[in-house]
Image (tube, rainbow, N blue to C red):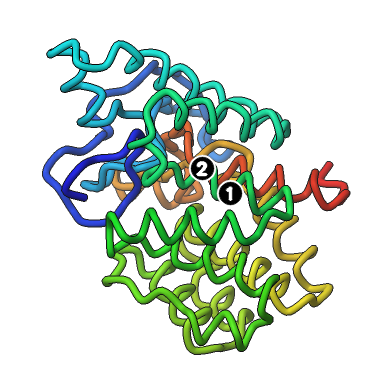
Amino acid sequence: MAVTALYLKPTTPISLSFSATHPRSLKTHTVTNTNTNKIFFFSSIIHSHQNPSPLLSRRLFLPSVSSIWDSLTGSNNNAREVVVATRRGMSLFRQGDVLGSLVEFDKAIELDPRQKAFLWQRGLSLYYLDRFEEGAEQFRLDVAQNTNDTEESIWCFLCEAQLYGVNGARERFLEVGRDPRPVMRGAYNMFKDGGDPEKLVAEFSSGSVNEYFYSFLYAGLYYESQKKAEAKLHILAASKSPYGQGFEFRTHPHYFSSSIRQHFLSNICVSYFRSDDYMASLARVHCLCRGWNSS
């Protein structure tokens, strides 16, 4: 984006990363080899960010460029209030108060109308309030600012499928640039051209925890756009997954010698990354709004 929104999501690779070299805390665990009675010590690092990849997530909070500039120049006394309102809106959405979240997002726009073009979170709230025309407008505004917004393109389709049907929505499909995430490229092509959601799940369900989550989430949303019952099974699976519950973890078997690895599973050493992905919360909110029991 030429002007960065209040929140950034993965679009293009950049040099800044949240890496495994910056742990939030360190926990030490012990495992006993039952064959030799020897005790091995290992650590699991808990991180505050979801992924040590070289992608800055739009789902992580950052003040907008406009807000930073306004704070420095004093040209907009509402900059802090805009940030607070948007944060509050996101928090309310995560808690399942979708209407309350929309009130806060609208407040942010009232304080600074420039923010409307970037508040993709507002579009999600509108979708769950069945205000599909406004939701589609919100996502189209966002894509106009960044033509690489894969997920906004898909959510525009989801809104318009409720208005015009799947075929009508596909005729209006917002084409965007290439997403760096393979799972999202697969989801994008499925919505754009039609396809089998089960193929998306089969391809990525054995991948990383976030790929598992996204494949099931967007397969479920695709089924929902077609008013098929399979939506429930897939979105519940996304919601109940580790990533959907708010965690990402990775194994590090290479920390140990080959002789030790012979006696233990490859996940003997695990780094737990706190997932702050807004979409993980969305999967849970989706189940709540549909009355599905995710316990």
The image shows residue 75 at horizontal and vertical percentages of 19, 16
Residue 42 makes an appearance in the image: no
The image shows residue 243 at horizontal and vertical percentages of 56, 45
Q: Which of 261 and 20 is in front in this view?
A: 20
108 relative position to 104: left or right: left
State the quadrant of the C terminus: top right
Residue 188 makes an appearance in the image: yes
Residue at 40%, 48% in the rendered image: 261
Location of mark 2 (residue): 121
Location of mark 1 (residue): 124
The image shows residue 141 at horizontal and vertical percentages of 39, 56
- The reply to whether dot 2 and dot 1 touch (C-beta < 8 Å) is yes
Whether 44 is drawn above or below 227: the answer is above
Residue at 36%, 70% in the rendered image: 182
Q: Nearer the viewer, residue 94 or 215?
A: 94
SS category of the residue bearing label 1: helix
Q: In which quarter of the image is residue 48?
A: top left
Whether 71 is drawn above or below 142: the answer is above
Q: Nearer the viewer, residue 12 or 29?
A: 12
Q: Nearer the viewer, residue 97 or 31?
A: 97
- Name which residue type carries label 1: Leu
Whether 147 is drawn above or below 291: the answer is below
Residue at 53%, 84% in the rendered image: 170
179 relative position to 26: left or right: left
Q: Mark 2: few, some, or many residues within 10 Å (few <14, many ≥20)?
A: many
Find residue 136 and name its label: none
Q: Distance between the residues labelled 2 and 1?
A: 5 Å
The image shows residue 132 at horizontal and vertical percentages of 65, 60
